[in-house]
Image (spheres, coloured by chain):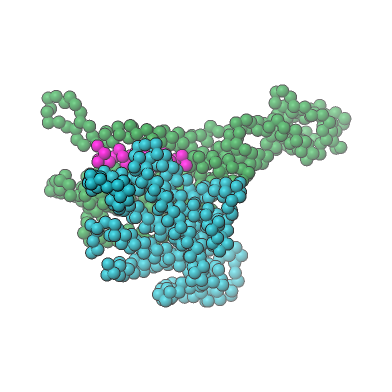
Amino acid sequence: MLRYVTGRLLSAIPTLFLIITISFFLIRVAPGGPFDLERPLEAKVMENLNKIYNLDKSLPEQYLLYLKSVLHGDFGPSFFFRDFSINELFAKSLPISMQLGLTALTLALIVGGILGITAALRQNHSVDYSVMAAATLGVTIPNFVVAPCLTLVFGVWLGWLPVGGWEGGKFVNAVLPVITLALPQVAVVARLTRGSMIEALRSNHVRTARAYGLSGYTIIVVHALRGAILPVVSYLGPAAAALLTGSVVIETIFGIPGIGRYFVQGALNRDYTLVMGTVVVVACFVIIFNIIVDLVYALLDPRVRFD
Amino acid sequence: MSDTSLDTATPAKLGRSLWDDARDRLLANKAAVTSIIVLAVIAVLSIFGPMFLPHQYDTVYRDYTKVPASLEAYPRQDQVEPAFNKIAKRARLSIESYKMREDGFVEAQVTSKRKIKERNAKRHFDRSDLFADTMVQGLTDGGKSATIVSRINYMHFYFGTDANGRDLLSRTLIAGRVSLTIGLLATIVAISIGVIYGATSGYLGGRVDLVMMRVVDILYSLPFIFFVIMLVVFFGRNFVLMFIAVGAVEWLDMARIVRGQTLSIKRQEYVQAAEAMGITDRGILKRHIIPNTLGPVVVYMTLLVPKVILLESFLSFLGLGVQEPMTSWGVLISEGARNLEGASWLLIFPSIFLTSTLFALNFIGDGLRDALDPKDR
């Protein structure tokens, strides 16, 4: 297994390299630069700025310089947040986004899983229909509608929870963002679990387990769920990567200093290093979670072999 | 799928194609049928509705900013007099007597320190959204006193108005046009690229397949938002072009699905038969492979349209989408979210339209999946 993981990690290197290359040149081709302000800077100032940030060098030269610093684990200085390096920005914001994302993910898995199993056990029953209707609603209502509605109800009318802000990650500040983040995921997990659970409940090994007279709990959790959870696992890989690297919308609405906002800000301000940094971080998460998914798959399904 | 029978003498019973079966199963699905109707209604309303509405989506009624949704006409009875007084004051007229006539006109006796100029008075009153067809009658007292008769201009705002005083109903419908067009356009682009790419890759197989799928893998791990935002940066205000580009990004899933399908189809006897007959790869792809992958493609398409509409909404929420005065459901919703306290109708109505569209598309997708699933027979 260790060999498998190392192999996968090694094969991720060229992918990562290509991603860095593509996005580096893509953002450089985009019109505008990091120092284009409403009021143009003086030529001399501009020249000095370009010199400091190595923008006066040729593009291939800059590319090599950037690659070199990334290889040393340094994402460079931010062009927009002048006093910060990208590493400093990420060190502060990534843990926040990860904490939110992980909580939302756990919540989605538990709630969605339970809902999905319940719906599958009562297939074509009113319970099933209402769970599925709620799940469809959860998928279709955009989070930027859910978020203001939740803040209005729980923040303004009832006054139970703060409307926004983070304050170092207090529990009350995290409740609404986590719920908003988790809601669509709950819905998807419930749908996927229901679908595969229905199939699993009809399968031969579950029928055998029933014939043995095993308890309902053992049949569902040990025998049916083990196979039924596989599609959920493969969905959750990319979803987890997306959740843990922050959500622009939720961080904007709730005023959370996470990493999600940097993407949009960086691209719009042409903060080259910031955009590149977020791209690399997100890509790494995607790659790592894909590997984790494959490992979990093998754990759950003994037919899967590492090769 | 053929319905020829060997027995040529009695062509009594026509065979049923798989598509007929699928259609019947779909029509038996109540949720799907309801969804199709809902979607059709929304589409027709969005396309033709704005032509029949009294308000243009970009007409600003300055006197009616953020008026709540209502079936009754504006102005309300109690709004008329204060508004009239305000205008009179602005026109330097003092009101001696004021009367609201039964026939929907306001009649007022006014005096002024200076000579009343008919055109001037008319302009002041008619400029307001509340009054129209103002007449200045019976100038007396050397032109310093007159009777002003003004028609109250009743207007309906069934969905209320936004912060700029624009009719929300017509804006919601126009937004529907934009959102649906974007959804459809981007989806068609994505599907076309994805199907052709996936089918080619799967059919040719071997090294070509490996390289083509490797490209998909790499594009997959590029953060999607990064792509989209770069597209916004490149294409800027031209949202049609932008969404063609979004479609050009969204094809990856489609390519994978079609490739998987193709891999199993190409081992079928009829494909081998076609190969044996010397039909070109292109011909086989066009005649045999692509038509047989259409089931999952159609299902995926109904799920991709909502995805694209949501994506557009998301971009609009960030202020990167459609530009004013044009609008889309996403733009309206993000405006509504900002005005949630005090003007909740701004969020409610566009959300209802967007959500029911997405809901309908999802149910149609589910219905199609069930209908086209060969295991379900």
Residue B145, x across and y down, in percent: 84, 31
Quadrant location, the C terminus of chain B: top left
Q: Tell me: residue A35, above or below residue B127.
A: below
- The reply to whether residue B179 is visible in this rendering is yes
At 86% across and 37% down in the image, what residue appears?
Answer: B113
Residue B90, x across and y down, in percent: 78, 40
Residue A272 placement, left or right of B267: right
- Magenta stretch: give its range: B355-377
At 36% across and 67% down in the image, what residue appears?
Answer: A16
Front residue of B292/B136: it is: B292
Q: Tell me: residue A300, above or below residue B158.
A: below
Based on the displayed image, in which of its 4 quarters is residue A13 positioned?
Answer: bottom left
Quadrant location, the N terminus of chain B: top left
- Chain A is shown in which shade? cyan
Residue A237, x across and y down, in percent: 36, 58
- Chain B is shown in which shade? green
Q: Tell me: residue A295, above or below residue B12.
A: below
Principal secondary structure, stretch drawn in magenta:
helix
At 67% across and 36% down in the image, what residue appears?
Answer: B129
Q: Is residue B361 inside the magenta stretch? A: yes
Based on the displayed image, in which of its 4 quarters is residue B154 positioned?
Answer: top right
At 36% across and 46% down in the image, what residue appears?
Answer: A117
Q: Is residue B63 inside the magenta stretch? A: no
Q: Tell me: residue A7, above or below residue A189.
A: below
